[in-house]
Amino acid sequence: MSKTLPGSCTVEDALPLAIPDRGSKPRNWGLLLTSVIGGSLVALYAVTTPFIAPALRKHCLPFVPATSKQMEYVLKMLKGRHGSLVDVGSGDGRIVIAAAKVGFRAVGYELNPWLVWYSRYQAMREGVHQNAKFYISDLWKVNFSQYKNVVIFGVPQMMLPLGEKLGEELQQDARVIACRFPFPHWSPTHTFGEGMDTVWAYDSESFGRKKGNGSVEISGVLPD
Ligand SMILES: C[S@@+](CC[C@H](N)C(=O)[O-])C[C@H]1O[C@@H](n2cnc3c(N)ncnc32)[C@H](O)[C@@H]1O
Ligand SMILES: *[C@@H]1O[C@H](CO)[C@@H](O)[C@H](O)[C@H]1NC(C)=O
Ligand SMILES: *[C@@H]1O[C@H](CO)[C@@H](O)[C@H](O)[C@H]1NC(C)=O
């Protein structure tokens, strides 16, 4: 599906994610088809809509669902926390739905409308649609300041600019949880798992605004 995306979204970009995990074969062909069709639609939309095209050109972020191990570690990292949660690029909604089931007010932002519709349908089926909301949005245009718990399964090249964006926006009591690819400039407060299933948690001592005046400047412009 990544091949259909325009701009610098190459197969190499997607490669670290595209290697199938043991035990995470796409058993759900309907969902796979949905994401392929959705991916093509997003590509078409991107070609015809300059508004979202820059986001896709900047960071190719294909749909690769979290593994069951990753899900387990994410939920562990959320133990003892509450309030609002956001999954940045929520895919088929599995993390948002799992978080809603354990009591979070959970929200997913996702660019692929088919995945958003699928997520809403799943949330309905699972009976958590009150606490699991999904929006068709570009993650680079969302202000995450209201969220106390932020989950991201990204790609390496987006982690630095995303970290800077989150460092700007998040409150001191927020926690950021990264799946598979860490934030290169933060040191995690917790790490679970290894290899492709690794999950990192960061609290404000890692991402919080540095005391002083300089930290704001670097985050204003994302690299091209
Ligand atoms: C690696 S998947 C992770 C899915 C989900 N968070 C999970 O762990 O199962 C990343 C998701 O981000 C979405 N995405 C890519 N670019 C995006 C953007 N600019 N804004 C919002 N979502 C985006 C993709 O469509 C894909 O579903
Ligand atoms: C995000 O929203 C908060 C609260 O509304 C606001 O204080 C902050 O300036 C916003 N940040 C950005 C980068 O827009
Ligand atoms: C921030 O800048 C102000 C004015 O330029 C200065 O007085 C203050 O000491 C600076 N704060 C830090 C922590 O560097």
Image (cartoon, rainbow, N blue to C red):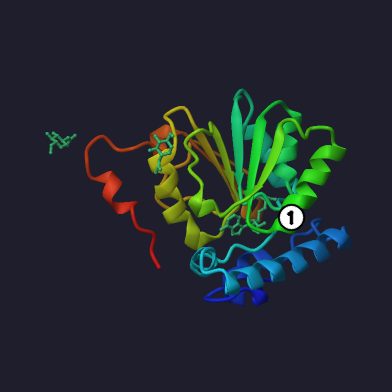
Mark 1 within 8 Å of ligand 1, using the beta carbon:
yes
50 sits to left or right of 17: left
Quadrant where the image shows the N terminus:
bottom right
Tell me what residue is drawn at x 39 percent, y 49 percent.
164
Seen in the picture, residue 194 relative to 47 is either above or below; the reply is: above
Mark 1 crowd level (few <14, some 14–19, many ≥20, 10 Å Cα)? many
Q: Quadrant of residue 104?
A: top right
Kindly state the secondary structure of the residue where label 1 is placed: helix
- In the rendered image, residue 144, in percent from the top left (x then y), is placed at 50, 40
Residue on which disc 1 sits: 115
Q: Quadrant of the C terminus?
A: bottom left
Residue visible at 68% across and 46% down in the picture = 70
Residue 198 is situated, as x and y percent measured from the top left of the image, at: 61, 48
User: How many numbered tags mark residues here?
Assistant: 1
Residue 98: quadrant of the picture: top right
Instruction: Residue 216: name its quadrant.
Output: top left
Q: Quadrant of ligand 1?
A: bottom right
Residue 162 on image: x %, y %:
46, 52
- Mark 1: which amino acid? Leu
